Amino acid sequence: MAATIFPFSSEVALIAALSSGMSELNALFLASSGNILAIIFNYFLGYLLYEKTKTKLLASKAGKKAYSYTHTYGYYALSLSWLPIIGDPLTLVAGLVRLRFVWFVLIAGSLRIVRYALLTLVV
């Protein structure tokens, strides 16, 4: 639930799991796979909103520019998707502008795994 539109902290859940004695590998696997499933949910939520949003975006000059930038720099923007607060909306926008799903999962998903791996090492 943490990477979806619902407010929830996956980091707190990961730390709680580690504190309760769960092995680091299991905690890392569960946190990463749950978070990856959540960003996939966001992607498809954005994907479903494509038609309504595209029409409105392309109706204005600023919207056309934003749409063009997103297609040009969308994959680079995904490199920030691991960050709290801004990362989850980026995963929704990726679906909204229909970035390629495979690249989306590879970029955003691998960054989520790295984030949790680093957190596991620190805790």
Image (cartoon, helix red, strand yellow):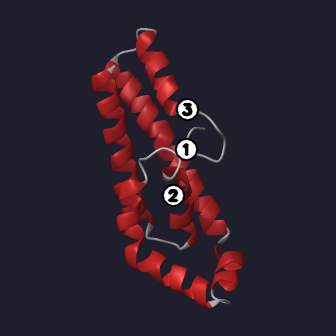
Q: Classify mark 2: helix, strand or loop.
A: helix
Query: In the rendered structure, which amino acid carries the disc numbered 2?
Result: Thr
Task: Determine which of the numbered discs, if any, sits on residue 3 in the image.
Answer: 1
**Mark positioned earlier in the residue sequence (3 or 1):** 1
**Numbered disc in front, either 3 or 1:** 3
Q: Is 57 displayed left or right of 71 in the figure?
A: right
Q: Are marks 2 and 1 in contact (CB under 8 Å)?
A: yes
**Residue drawn at 40 percent across, 60 percent down:** 78
Q: Which residue is mark 2?
A: 91
Q: Position of residue 120 (x, y in %)?
A: 33, 25
Q: Which mark is residue 69?
A: none
Image position of 108 with respect to 94: above or below:
above
Give the position of the C terminus as an image quadrant: top left
Q: Are marks 3 and 1 in contact (CB under 8 Å)?
A: no
Q: Position of residue 98 (x, y in %)?
A: 52, 72
User: Which type of secondary structure does the marked residue at label 1 adopt?
Assistant: loop
The residue lying at 43 percent from left, 47 percent from top is 83
Name the residue located 35 percent from the left edge and 56 percent from the top edge: 106
The amino acid type of the residue labelled 1 equals: Ala
Which residue is the extreme one toward the top?
21
The amino acid beneath tag 3 is Ser
Label 1 Cα crowd, 10 Å radius (few <14 / some 14-19 / many 20+):
many
Residue in the picture at 35% in, 39% down? 115
Say which residue label 3 marks. 9
User: From mark 3 to mark 1, how far is it between C-alphas?
Assistant: 8 Å
- Mark sitting earlier along the chain (2/1): 1
Horizontally, residue 58 falls left or right of residue 52, namely left
Label 2 – label 3 distance at C-alpha: 17 Å
Q: Earlier in the sequence, mark 2 or mark 3?
A: 3
